[in-house]
Amino acid sequence: MRMTRFASSLLVLLALFACTSVAPAQNQPQPQPAPMPPPIPAPVDKPYTGPIALSVDISEVTDRVWKVHEEIPVEPGAKEMVLLYPEWIPGDHEPSGPISAIAGIVTTVDGKGAQWVRDRVNMYAFHVPLSAGAKTVGLDFDYLSPITPSSGRVEMSDAIADLAWNEVVMYPAGYFSRDIPLDVSLKLPAGWKYATALETASNQGDTVRFERTTLNTLVDSPLYAGVNYERIDLSPTATDIVHLDIFADKPEDLKMTPQELEAHKNLAAEADKLYGSHHYKHYDFLLLLSEKVGGIGLEHHQSSEDGLGADYLTDWDGSALDSDLLGHEYTHSWNGKFRRPADLWTPNFNVPMRDDLLWVYEGMTQYWGTVLTARAGMRTVEQTRDIFARTAAGFAISRGRDWRPLVDTTNQPIISQRAPVSWGSYERGEDYYDEGMLIWLDADTKIRELTNGQKSLDDFCKKFFGVYNGSFITDTYSLDDVIHDLNEVAPYDWRGFLEERVYKLHPDVPMNGFTQGGYKLVYTDKPAEWYEKDMTKLGFTSFPSLGFSLGSYRSKVESKNISDVAWGSPAFQAGITPGMEIVSVNGKEYTAQVLKDAILAAETSKQPIQLQFHKGDRYFTISMPCYDGMRYPSLERVDGTPDRLDDILAPSKSPLPAM
Ligand SMILES: [Zn+2]
């Protein structure tokens, strides 16, 4: 057992404590906690006194300082107004409102200066004193949109902007966000076009005025703007209600081939067939293709923010790893936005969210996003099986499963704020996404098995998400509601099924979905070529039999830097840690191919591989007895069993529902 630095410093601390815990001299009193300031007014479901006028100016492309002005009506008789900057952003699953990026806050009351005071406890709350009979609070502030990735996700280039309204608005405490009306205007860079789920009231030069909306809908309706823009109708019928709004840094990156257009249209049709309903007036996929603006996937009720690399369309064959993004975010219009866990729904954007049902919200969305992508032909069935196999194999080497139930990983966004950690496989990351996907595959194949193929998780979707067709008022649910509707589709011990997989320790990866689907997970020395190619393009190389990975996702360059080491793996046992650089393999300069060749050779020669590493000013060589080969995972058909998995991934045979 080795003593960590933390343990040794704890001993020193305990020793110090022992020395200082003596009786106070001269009867000096012990300190007592100071009283907390009064709480921020809790949200109440009552109409706000009048519309807030919100003007936002994002016309400065160079400095990317977005200017905000608000005129906020005062509730008659109020003595102060508490302004809130949104903290809990739906879809982020954590308190991520970028409070550190606002500056230049100035408040007035009826045109006269009135100094704001930030709350001493809640950094997102600002108190504005009101004079008797005050009518309007004026507010100006700047949002400093990140210029480099080191200060946050870059949201603007000289050709594209991704405007999330929660970054450019404050609102009075004490109200539900759905009860606060706003009249919004936006000044764009000269000549830029825009797309949003908001309804336009008028355009004057580069200034847009939107129809009156609520704070709830505004924050749920981001706006993309840019120089190069293409709007494509994806509606499955002649309704013209589903659009792909593409913005790119370069005009040539906007072009779709007929095959790509067909696949994207199929996605909208397959979703209609699956859910038999929709919950929007019209839906806009806001898609940005850029190497300058940061990637994103964020769900909204009537739109989604989808940020991918510049070559998503121009290298379609090499985009298979990313091609489920639109299916995932579109599914959220039903799962997450329309139907939402009751404790995740909040009345405004400064009430904490509870993430414990994200394995339904995100896990089932990951499942349906993956399945719909295959049904639409945006990924082949073989590629989809490879994704399932890779997912299960990745979890199989994660030792975090030994101590942490899946449900606890739903807290991970709040715990880690999505910052990188040193030993991700020991801590477990946000496994509720991908392991959730495997659990819902398990449930889908189980329903098919129980009903002799008469019912499936498709039926659950129609029942659970298909209510109140056309409505986009959120309908909340509990775990009991999920279990109830599963039982309506196919009676079974669904509570026990979910208890075992989600709420208890489950050291084994849930792979019943493969067995019930007619497949088994196997490891071979032959890679899925498309996967290897795509990962290399992204700049990421993985050696699962050794237990380490190199490079970072999307760096797009081959790297020699160890980015991750699986806890308990051969590399871990040999003392390899993230941050080291691999130098050579059996005396030859490292390349990914040289190491692959060495691993395959060792499988037959049974001779340890000599790996040289570099860290700081040290070079050292490690001898690794690794004879398992490359261990590329794939799904192998089990002859004589029902091929339920391929049935799930095939285009739906149902007709398009009339909606
Ligand atoms: Zn999601």
Image (cartoon, helix red, strand yellow):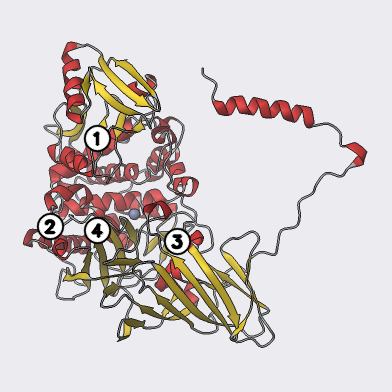
State the separation of the CA atoms marked 2 and 3.
38 Å
Dots 4, 1 in contact, CB < 8 A: no
Q: Could you tell whether 48 is left or right of 577 in the image?
A: right
Q: Earlier in the sequence, mark 3 or mark 1?
A: 3
Q: Amino acid at mark 3?
A: Ile
Dots 3, 1 in contact, CB < 8 A: no
Question: Image height check: is 96 above or below 568?
Answer: below
Q: From the viewer's perspective, is the residue at label 3 or at label 1 nearer?
A: 1
Query: Which residue is under mark 3?
Result: 89
Q: Earlier in the sequence, mark 2 or mark 1?
A: 1
Instruction: Tell me the SS state at disc 3.
Output: loop
Query: Which residue is under mark 1?
Result: 541
Q: From the viewer's perspective, is the residue at label 4 or at label 1 nearer?
A: 4
Q: Could you tell whether 615 is left or right of 181 in the image?
A: left
Query: Which residue is under mark 4?
Result: 290
Q: From the viewer's perspective, is the residue at label 3 or at label 4 nearer?
A: 4
Looking at the rendering, which quadrant does residue 12 occupy? top right
The disc placed on residue 653 is: 2
State the separation of the CA atoms marked 4 and 1.
23 Å
In the rendered image, the quadrant that contains the C terminus is bottom left
Looking at the rendering, which quadrant does residue 585 occupy? top left
Q: Amino acid at mark 1?
A: Thr
State the separation of the CA atoms marked 2 and 1.
39 Å
Q: Amino acid at mark 2?
A: Lys
Q: Could you tell whether 408 is left or right of 369 in the image?
A: right
Is residue 439 visible to the viewer in this orientation of the structure?
A: yes
State the separation of the CA atoms marked 3 and 1.
33 Å
Q: Position of residue 416 (x, y in %)?
A: 47, 45
